[in-house]
């Protein structure tokens, strides 16, 4: 896995999205498996589970904040579920879902390529 951070912007504020093993662990703890969470949030066979999507986005944003805070003197506060729900509403579910999917794919794709070259 690679620590890839993408940013989403809203009202002049950038929010980092990071998909790491820490995020996968939180998803597994809550939903049993990363695969189950993916099925709940991809909207392919059923309606997107908003709670699961919001949880994943919250964890990804807070992981991004945590990573960025490691190198900052002024630490940024973590978001809560209500703040992320408002962010999703304002940015748009489709736009944010696309950004999340890109982040997940890019974070895991590099590992697959590295394993092939090893």
Image: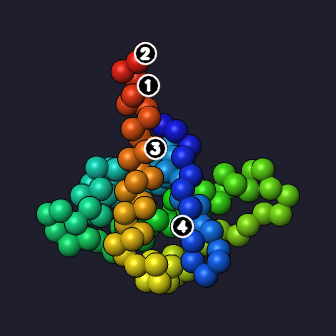
Q: Earlier in the sequence, mark 2 or mark 3?
A: 3
Residue at the spot x=32%, y=50% of the render? 33
Disc 4 is placed on an element classified as: strand
Disc 1 is placed on an element classified as: helix
Q: Is residue 21 visible?
A: yes
Query: Badge 3: how crowded within 10 Å, few (<14), some, or many (20+)?
Result: many
Q: Is residue 51 visible?
A: no
The span from disc 4 to disc 3 (Cα, nearest Å) is: 16 Å
The span from disc 2 to disc 1 (Cα, nearest Å) is: 6 Å
x and y percentages locating residue 89 in the rendered image = 43, 83
The span from disc 1 to disc 3 (Cα, nearest Å) is: 12 Å
Between 88 and 22, the one nearer to me in the picture: 88
The span from disc 2 to disc 4 (Cα, nearest Å) is: 33 Å
In the rendered image, which residue does mark 1 sit on?
114
Label ID, residue 107: 3
In the rendered image, which residue does mark 2 sit on?
118
x and y percentages locating residue 47 in the rendered image = 20, 73
In the rendered image, which residue does mark 4 sit on?
8
Q: Quadrant of the C terminus?
A: top left
Q: Are marks 2 and 1 in contact (CB under 8 Å)?
A: yes
Residue at the spot x=29%, y=71% of the render? 49
Q: Are marks 2 and 4 in contact (CB under 8 Å)?
A: no
x and y percentages locating residue 56 in the rendered image = 43, 62
The span from disc 2 to disc 3 (Cα, nearest Å) is: 18 Å
């Amino acid at each position: 896995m690679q620590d890839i951070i993408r940013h989403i912007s809203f009202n002049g504020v950038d929010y980092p999205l990071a998909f790491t093993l820490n995020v996968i662990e939180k998803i597994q703890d809550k939903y049993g498996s990363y695969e189950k969470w993916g099925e709940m949030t991809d909207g392919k066979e059923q309606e997107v589970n908003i709670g699961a999507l919001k949880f994943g986005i919250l964890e990804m944003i807070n992981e991004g904040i945590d990573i960025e805070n490691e190198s900052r003197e002024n630490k940024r506060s973590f978001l809560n579920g209500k703040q992320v729900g408002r962010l999703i509403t304002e940015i748009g579910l489709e736009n944010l879902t696309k950004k999340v999917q890109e982040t997940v794919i890019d974070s895991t794709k590099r590992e697959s390529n590295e394993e092939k070259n090893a």
